[in-house]
Amino acid sequence: MQVALSQYFPILVFLAIGAFLGLAFVFGSKLAARQKPYPEKLTAYECGFDAFGDARRRFDVRFYLVAILFIIFDVEVAFLFPWAISLGRIGAVGFFSMLGFLGVLTVGFVYEWNKGALDWE
């Protein structure tokens, strides 16, 4: 039992050093930094202007639509990197499979563009 626990000693040392450094940096910055807050520094920052209204108010559906479109096309890029790396091994079948995938996404993108989902009024 003693031998098994001694194998975890380097991990304990690592955690102790990490905790010590984290606390040292936090308290060191409190001691060394200039602590003079002013009203502008203490206000909430919202795109360069003062906060207005309640944070739980209803948003326009276009915000959500743009967020969903961003996620869809971000996933497309996430699939392109592994495909590009393994293209030499997967050959022509993988190449044409990805072309089909990109074709479907392109048709979806053109559809959304024609419907006006990307237009901001």
Image (cartoon, rainbow, N blue to C red):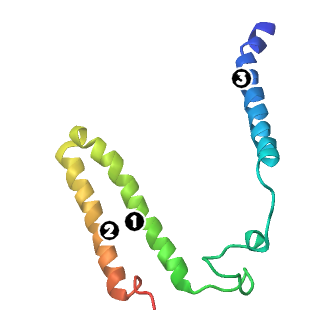
What kind of residue is marked 1?
A: Phe
Quadrant position of residue 44: bottom right
Residue drawn at 39 percent across, 65 percent down: 73
Q: Nearer the viewer, mark 1 or mark 2?
A: 1
Q: Are marks 1 and 2 in contact (CB under 8 Å)?
A: yes
117 sits left or right of 102 in the view: right
Q: Which numbered dot is residue 56?
A: none
Residue 92 x %, y %: 17, 47
Identify the secondary structure beneath mark 2: helix
- Mark 3 belongs to which amino acid? Ile
Q: Which residue is mark 1?
A: 73
Q: Secondary structure at mark 3?
A: helix
The image quarter in which residue 70 lies: bottom left
Q: Position of residue 107 (x, y in %)?
A: 28, 74
Contact? badges 3 and 1 (CB < 8 Å):
no
Q: What residue do we see at 71% from left, 18% from top?
A: 10
Left or right of residue 1: residue 84:
left
Quadrant assignment for the N terminus? top right
CA distance for labels 3 and 2:
47 Å
**How far apart are the two marked residues, 3 and 1, measured between alpha carbons?**
41 Å
Locate residue 60 relative to residue 102 in the image: left or right.
right
Look at the numbered disc 1 and give the secondary structure of its residue.
Answer: helix
The three-letter amino acid code for the residue at tag 2 is Leu
Between the C-alphas of marks 1 and 2, the distance is 8 Å
Marks 3/2 in contact by CB < 8 Å: the verdict is no
- Of callouts 3 and 2, which one flags the residue occurring earlier in the amino acid sequence? 3
Task: State whether residue 118 is above or below residue 30.
Answer: below
Residue that carries the numbered disc 3 in the rendered image: 11
Residue at position x 75%, y 84% in the image: 54
Disc number placed over residue 105 in the picture, else none: 2
N-term mark: 3 or 1: 3
Q: Sort mark 3 into few (<14), some (14-19) or many (20+) by Cα contacts within 10 Å.
A: few
